[in-house]
Amino acid sequence: MKAEPERPGASAHADLARLREEIERIDRTLIELIARRVNLAREVGAAKRAAGLPTLDPAREAAVIRQAAVLGREAKLVDDDVRQIFWHIIGLSRRAQLENE
């Protein structure tokens, strides 16, 4: 019996499906990591309150953004994009720290 010829583009479609599955796995991992970071931020907020320190620390936030930009450059990502992403993440963390004030 003769094998059926492969459909044109079938391999490309399989590659696309595989790549999309990998992106979805990475997305799940990113969400898990963001959730872990936000939970740690809650703990940081509690530790700051226990130490009598202000919850918001703009200098620390700016340092985190600068470090993220450096890491982004090393990964060959656009600085402004990385900074924007991290400002959003810091916003989530800031809100988590302020939850129990």
Image (tube, rainbow, N blue to C red):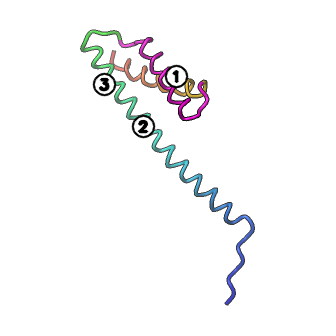
**Magenta region:** 55-79
Q: Position of residue 2 (x, y in %)?
A: 69, 87
Closer to the chain start, of discs 3 and 1, is 3
Q: Amino acid at mark 1?
A: Trp
Q: Quadrant of residue 56?
A: top left
Measure the alpha-carbon separation of dots 2 and 3: 15 Å
In this rendered view, identify the residue nearer to me: 11 or 54.
11
Secondary structure of the residue carrying numbered label 2: helix
View extreme (front): residue: 74
Question: As displayed, is residue 77 above or below residue 66?
Answer: below
Q: Quadrant of the N terminus?
A: bottom right
Is residue 56 highlighted in magenta?
Answer: yes
Closer to the chain start, of discs 2 and 3, is 2
Q: Residues within 10 Å of mark 1 (few under 14, many from 20)?
A: some
Residue 20 shown left or right of residue 42 in the figure = right
Secondary structure of the residue carrying numbered label 1: helix
Q: Position of residue 92 (x, y in %)?
A: 46, 25
Residue behind mark 1: 87
Q: Residue at x 70, y 80 (%)?
A: 4
Secondary structure of the residue carrying numbered label 3: helix
Residue behind mark 3: 43
